[in-house]
Image (spheres, rainbow, N blue to C red):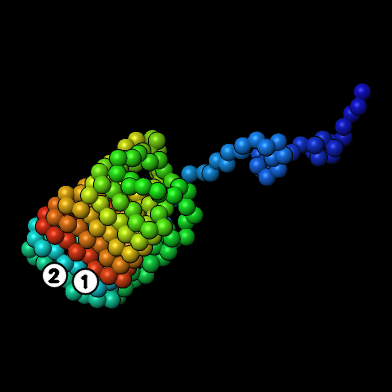
Amino acid sequence: MVTLSRLSARLLIIPFAALLVAACEHNDLGLATTIITPPPGPGPSLGTASTYGILAATAVTCVTNGTISADVGISPGGALTGFPPCSQTGAQHLADAVAAQAQIDLTAAYNALVALPCGTTIVADLGGTTITPGVYCSASSVGVTVTVTLNGGGDPDARFVIKAGSTLTTAGSVALTNGTQAKNVWWQVGSSATLGTASAWKGNILAQITITLNDNANLLGRALARTGAVTLGTNNFIALP
């Protein structure tokens, strides 16, 4: 009978994870391999920008009957129009040091989203689809014509990141199911975002240039614009998630 020394036994033990890696890298049998990626981790920190329902760089405009249940800030500009008749429950920071720091923190969060590797490429309108947690990317625009459903699979920490290389344009809404929370939904927009009339939107919108809410569009989340304005129409409502 052959007896292995303890050292020999250790050398023969190959961790199971290493076997999986070897199988993926050296498949000489021509068999298909499946690479399972872990779910995305927690979203980026917004820092001091987290208290803002609206944060813009140049101006914020509201026509009438708008309600912002959060802070409103502008930096480096300070042009605030329509408050009143529109209202807010939080503080206003216009071209001050507080708003400037919020913009710095917004930039850091925006860049963190840009740096995330793409998990799924968006090839069509998201309206009428159901998506699971992950990072979704379009090199150009993202459109949502009807309702898009975000299914968290029972995980209250499930994260969704949708990245649009240029614009986000909606004529539909966002539905959250199976534990999905609006605070864990991120819309990173390379230029401008436009929420269509009566859209019921959810998640944090981080746009490079501008964000527009048309009449009766509501947002459970944040409208955060890095270099341009945030414009509201009539009967808009924004609340922090």
Toward which corner of the image does residue 229 lie, by quadrant? bottom left
- Residue 142: x and y, percent? 33, 53
Badge 1: few (under 14), some or many (20 or more) residues near its Cα, within 10 Å? many
Judging by the rendered image, the residue that carries numbered circle 2 is 81
Question: Residue lying furthest right in this view?
Answer: 1
Circle 1 SS class: strand
Q: Are marks 1 and 2 in contact (CB under 8 Å)?
A: yes
Task: Classify the position of the N terminus by image quarter.
Answer: top right
Residue 24, given in percent of the width and then of the height, sits at: 65, 42
For residue 158, side relative to residue 99 (left or right) = right
Q: Is residue 101 left or right of residue 18?
A: left
Q: Nearer the viewer, residue 96 or 161?
A: 161
Give the residue type that dot 2 points to: Thr
Q: Which residue is mark 1?
A: 59
Whole-Å distance between the Cαs marked 1 and 2?
Answer: 8 Å
19 left or right, relative to 136: right
Mark sitting earlier along the chain (1/2): 1
Number of marks in the rendered image: 2
Quarter holding residue 225: bottom left
Residue 214 seen in render:
yes
| Residue found at x 33% / y 45% | 126
Tell which of 24 and 40 is nearer to you.
Answer: 24
Residue 159 image offset from top left, x and y in percent: 40, 47
List x then y, in percent, for residue 198.
16, 49
From what the image shows, is residue 76 above or below residue 214? Answer: below
Residue at screen point 80% across, 37% down: 12
User: Which residue occupies 20% across, 53% down?
Assistant: 196
